[in-house]
């Protein structure tokens, strides 16, 4: 990957700054994080500067206790920048969803279980009853026409429904695998810019995630992840959860599996519906 030395330097600087500045047991305020997101996205690319910042923020903010070690920070950063094929820590997801998440993450070689779990958190916060503004339903928030194409009666209850957790998760996995297949075909055909110089590497996984959010037509037109706040922010947000679902960084006591804790909350809320 071009610019590797420069990217590594930026990642190291951010990582070291986070570790050095976490004596209070937190990383950054949500306001400061949001400000950084706007600045970096405007500069073009979700890349190496924002990546470790958000990844470590989501892992450790609100957890109290000691700040992350440099070893943990390095490991988290590596997972963030990786292919998402690490082993799922099943204690980080609701117990009744661990099996379908594992199975959905084994449908093809391009998508792993931690990708599935991370994307569910981004899409629905593990709320299986969620209904989106355009008719998206369930954990994976697939558009109705997409769910009709990829959904099956995976829980064998006699119906195929996006509000059934297993049906939704398995449809998500099938669709991601199809998007990854299309992304690989684009790369093989030379239709993708492998790097835009701003940290966006346009891997098969990045293309699939962006396609899930904004559609593969937009990805093709942009020759990669579109350089928009929506598309790049989506890919970043999903990747930022990878380390957590791989079990790197213990969640705070009382945290609901599958949900990033609200650092401003004083009491734990009810667990999200998963059936």
Image (spheres, rainbow, N blue to C red):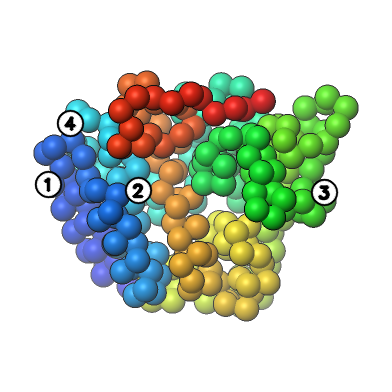
Residue at numbered disc 3: 148
Residue under numbered circle 2 = 55
Up-down relation of residue 1 to residue 115 (above or below): below
Residue drawn where x is 68% and y is 32% of the image = 165
Q: Are marks 2 and 1 in contact (CB under 8 Å)?
A: no
Q: Which residue is mark 1?
A: 20
Q: Secondary structure at mark 1?
A: helix
Q: Nearer the viewer, mark 4 or mark 3?
A: 3
Find the distance from the CA under tag 4 to the CA under tag 1: 12 Å
Q: Is residue 262 visible?
A: yes
> Is residue 52 something that shows in the picture?
no
Secondary structure under the numbered disc 4 in the rendered image: loop
Q: Look at the numbered discs 4 and 3 and tell me whether their residues touch, using CB distance below 8 Å.
A: no
Of labels 3 and 2, the one closer to you: 3
Q: Is 167 placed left or right of 194 in the picture? A: right
Residue at disc 2, secondary structure? helix
Q: Which residue position is annotated with label 4?
A: 66
Looking at the image, which residue is at 83% across and 26% down?
A: 156
State the residue at coordinates (16%, 53%).
17
Q: Which one is earlier in the sequence, the residue at label 3 or at label 2?
A: 2
Quadrant in the picture for the N terminus: bottom left
Q: Nearer the viewer, mark 3 or mark 1?
A: 3
* For marks 4 and 1 on the same chain, the one whose residue lies earlier in the sequence: 1
């Amino acid at each position: 990957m071009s610019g590797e030395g420069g990217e590594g330097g930026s990642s190291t600087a951010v990582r070291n700054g986070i570790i050095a500045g976490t004596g209070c047991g937190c990383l950054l305020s949500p306001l400061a994080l949001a400000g950084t997101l706007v600045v970096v996205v405007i500069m073009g690319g979700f890349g190496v500067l924002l990546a470790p910042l958000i990844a470590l923020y989501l892992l450790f903010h609100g957890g109290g206790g000691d700040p992350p070690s440099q070893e943990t920070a390095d490991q988290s950063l590596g997972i963030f920048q990786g292919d998402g094929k690490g082993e799922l820590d099943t204690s980080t997801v609701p117990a009744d969803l661990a099996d379908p998440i594992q199975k959905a993450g084994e449908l093809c070689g391009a998508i792993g279980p931690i990708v599935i779990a991370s994307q569910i958190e981004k899409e629905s916060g593990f709320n299986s009853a969620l209904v989106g503004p355009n008719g998206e339903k369930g954990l994976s928030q697939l558009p109705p026409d997409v769910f009709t194409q990829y959904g099956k009666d995976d829980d064998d209850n006699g119906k195929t429904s996006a509000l059934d957790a297993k049906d939704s998760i398995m449809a998500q996995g099938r669709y991601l695998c199809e998007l990854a297949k299309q992304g690989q075909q684009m790369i093989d055909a030379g239709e993708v810019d492998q790097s835009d110089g701003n940290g966006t590497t346009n891997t098969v996984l990045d293309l699939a995630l962006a396609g899930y959010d904004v559609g593969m037509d937009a990805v093709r037109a942009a020759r990669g992840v579109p350089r928009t706040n929506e598309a790049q922010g989506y890919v970043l947000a999903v990747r930022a959860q990878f380390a957590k679902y791989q079990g790197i960084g213990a969640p705070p006591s009382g945290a609901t599996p599958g949900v990033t804790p609200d650092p401003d909350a004083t009491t734990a809320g009810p667990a999200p519906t998963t059936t």
